[in-house]
Amino acid sequence: MALAAYLFTPTSHPQHHSVPLRLVGASASSLPLTPSRQLRLTPSATAGPYFSSAPAPLSRYGSQNTKSLVVRFALGGGDGDSNHGSSGGGGGGDHDGGADNAGDNNRREALMALTEADRALASLPDDLTAAIQAGRIPGSVVSRFFELENSPLLAWLLQFGGFKERLLADDLFLAKVAMECGVGIFTKTAAEYERRRENFFKELEIVFADVVMAIIADFMLVYLPAPTVSLRPALAKNAGSIAKFFYSCPDNAFQIALPGISYTLMQRLGSIAGNGAKLFAVGTTSSLVGTAVTNAFINARKVVDTSSAGEVENVPILSTSAAYGVYMAVSSNLRYQVLAGVIEQRILEPLLHKHKLMLSAICFAVRTGNTFLGSLLWVDYARWVGIQ
């Protein structure tokens, strides 16, 4: 233990600034020197702005009156991996599982990010603070939060939970929303023309309905399947088993899990089912709006041009809306889950994470192609089920 006291004694070297720490509740006789041991170290009153204002202990070794930091160290000539430490001699040793170790690592990284940014834990939003204390997010997420705060628009969007969770998982999320909604109108119109050709202007009302549905749905197609950093509060204890299951599912079935979090195959399949149900509701609602607007234009055209009264028929509202809801729940859901979770997060982001401009350009091209493909598939599907 004298070795530990020596290792953590603050230095007075003029070129370094160390955080003063003191050893709490340990003596040479009470803690045997095992290959891997956790020590609780408490910062002194001069430890800096972060520790002096942190509201609660960040490890389970603390108490209400002690702000503590768990530091792992290894003794001897081993590889230093505490996950593979020996059983040792003395009893009472702490043998955390993999999840506990990942949580400790996440908390330690988050502390380092806060210290580097000279920020206090109390200055963060409550949901982010709770996630840090629970060890659910690593330091990279905290650092990204500080970067996003530099933009007035993004800082404003961070006030909303759904946007915050998605921006922390993907700093290009807002750009992808703009890509999808901006390009969607043109690509869907081009796809309609490709399928209809000489009937394009004759079926202009149907084309208009499709484009209106696309404008409403495009945002949700980006929003719902986007990977997230979960900051949701815990469920009530009396929540049902179905609610608990879908609460544990990721927002994207293919997203990369953060350290300390893992998803089973059933949870990932549950993500597809849950998003499918949401997109069915979105598709049905947007189609109701689109077809209602289309029928209003058709009826107005009949009043103005009586010669076309027999040529143009109203679009069936209920059958079209239900068909579009099913299409979004199946085709759109699967395509956008794969696009966001596999192509972008698992392939493009690791390759081009240091080249944001190139990454944005490739994402733009891939999303444009996906939108055009979706429009082609919708026209074929609508004809197949007999609503167009």
Image: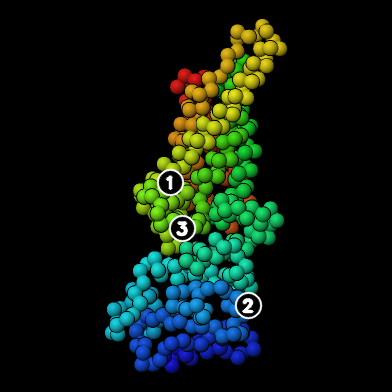
Q: Is residue 39 left or right of residue 296?
A: left
Label 3 vs 2, first from the N-terminus: 2
Label 2 vs 1, first from the N-terminus: 2
Pick the quarter of the image with the N terminus.
Answer: bottom left
Which residue lies at the image location 59% right of the left edge and 58% below the top edge? 354
Image position of 148 with respect to 107: above or below: above
- How far apart are labels 1 and 3 at the CA level? 18 Å
Q: What mark, if any, has residue 234 been given in the picture?
A: 3
Q: Secondary structure at mark 1?
A: helix
Which residue lies at the image location 36% right of the left edge and 89% below the top edge? 30
> How would you rate the neighbour count of disc 2 (Cα within 10 Å): few for under 14, some for 14-19, many for 20 or more?
some
Q: Residue 276 occupies which quadrant of the picture?
A: top left
Name the residue beneath numbered marker 2.
49
Kindly identify the amino acid type of the residue bearing the numbered disc 3: Ala
Kindly identify the amino acid type of the residue bearing the numbered disc 1: Ser
Name the residue beneath numbered marker 1.
271
Q: Residue furthest front?
A: 238
Label 1 vs 3, first from the N-terminus: 3
